[in-house]
Image: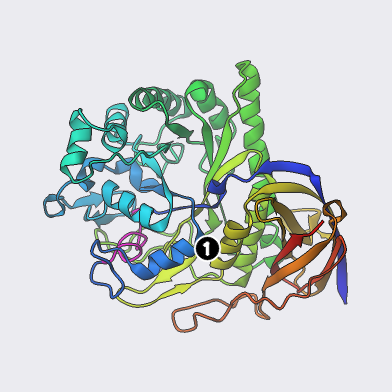
Amino acid sequence: MSIQSKMIVDKDFKLAEVDPRLYGSFIEHLGRAVYGGIYEPGHPTADANGFRGDALQAIRALRVPIIRYPGGNFVSGYNWEDGVGPKESRKRSLELAWWTTETNQMGTNEFADWAKLAGSEVMMAVNLGTRGIDAARNLVEYCNHPSGSYWSDLRISHGYQAPHNFRTWCLGNEMDGPWQIGAKTAVEYGRLANETAKAMRWVDPTLELVACGSSGSSMSTFAEWEATVLDLTYDNVDFLSLHTYYNNNNGDTANFLASSLDMDQFIDSVAAVCDYIKAKKKSKKKIYLSLDEWNVWKTQGTSRAQQHWEIAPPEFEDVYNLEDALVVGCCLISLLKHADRVKMACIAQLINVIAPIMTEDGGPLWLQTTYYPYMHASIYGRGTVLHPLITSPKYDSRDFTDVPYLEAVSVFNEEVNEVTVFAVNRHLGEGMELTVDLRSFGAVEVIQHTILEHEDLQAANTRSNPANVLPHNRGTAAADGGRVSAQLPAASWNVIRLRVNG
């Protein structure tokens, strides 16, 4: 027996063009994300710079457009000067965000080199915890000024004649959080962020800048923080950040699969605050959103490194199962449904730390279940998001009401003349018969129907069983003129690619 859902996709019901940076990610100096993740001299696949080749290959396959660096909580105590210049003279420092020892063998220039190899832009973050205007403007000068000044000439002396030209910069990280080094009130942060933004733009007027929103919607200062910060920074920033994580630590799968409804509400709420300040200032400028930390995070809230001052100890190495992948898929659909306002997003993080990619020091690499919906969305979710009209049975869970069993969105890529439907069947026990009406496109044909499923929702990919949960292309989607019918298995992620012939 199957439940019935319908979807109407009209080529004129355009929401927004997808900014490719919606599929960004994040690498922080935390755990084994850098050391043992992207950088491991001596690994069998490492190049002359110490970059793991197997990690680069897996990351390139994701087509990650932008990567946030170097933090995260790490950045609020980071002295960027410690990570440039000859490696043999770089000092080791006590890293207070995660209670580890930072070797500084990977720094700004190395990350710029690595990002080019990965095919990604860099979203740089500046330290507004222990530092401020001066360090930020000097870092911009070091990274982006061609030559003829102290900091740009220092970069050249370090072997980088051409500037890095980083365009996107975060003004600190989670400055409302009491766990943050140098945490601030909204007024304290807003004033500092505004003055820092001015100085950074005076060095390089082409920068686009991201102000810190709340660390999450559960913060006691949420919404008031956004309003105050934007009131103080509106004219000098382009984006406001959002951070959100989800987990199923209480074992309620139906409720967990509805998590993207919380993401929808969070995005809508922050956008409303942005528009309130726009109206208050009588401004014509629209602030866009950067959801630059999001993911499933099962171990959130656990203690920092168990043994203080280790170098790159394993931390937050969550093992992701099928239900985690379904939530990641639903969140990707949510981001696409808000592509008119969310222009950047970063799944946190990219490798080893709550990540889709895992490595063993000196050993192999494997892909977690969450890798696949992320890869599918990044590759096939480029183009124009179309407003889908969806009819689906619904259910109630502990925290949510009227949760549609079908979570879906469609993207039209006019360059290759393809429509892609991303769909999750949230029903845990029944398949779904999905009918998609695409008559406005004329005739269509099915290119491929990819499914991620498993009889066990807790099934995961591990070092010893890396191919336990893999997508397959045995989906049943079939086209008849401008209509498509497909069977979506219970608890499944689906990608239906359609070629437009009309």
Tell me if I can see residue 243 in this picture: no
Q: Quarter-wise, where is residue 316 in the image?
A: bottom left
Q: Does residue 450 lie above or below 228 as drawn?
A: below
Where residue 196 sits in the image (x, y, percent)?
37, 26
Quadrant where the N terminus sits is bottom right
Residue under numbered circle 1: 298
Q: Is residue 33 magenta?
A: yes
Other residues around mark 1 within 10 Å, as few (<14) / some (14–19) / many (≥20): some
- Coloration of the structure image: rainbow
Q: Is residue 437 left or right of residue 31?
A: right
Q: Residue furthest front?
A: 502
Specify start and end residues of the magenta stretch as a single range.
28-40
Q: Residue at x 34, y 37 (%)?
A: 127
Where residue 125 sits in the image (x, y, percent)?
38, 41
Q: Is residue 49 left or right of residue 117?
A: left
Q: Is residue 186 left or right of residue 199?
A: right
Q: Residue furthest bottom?
A: 464
Type of the residue with mark 1: Lys
Q: Does residue 441 lie above or below 132 as drawn?
A: below
Where residue 87 sits in the image (x, y, percent)?
16, 53
Q: Residue at x 75, y 73 (%)?
A: 490
| Viewer-proximal residue among 412 and 266 | 412
Q: Residue at x 62, y 22 (%)?
A: 278
Element at label 1 = loop
The majority secondary structure of the magenta stretch comes to loop
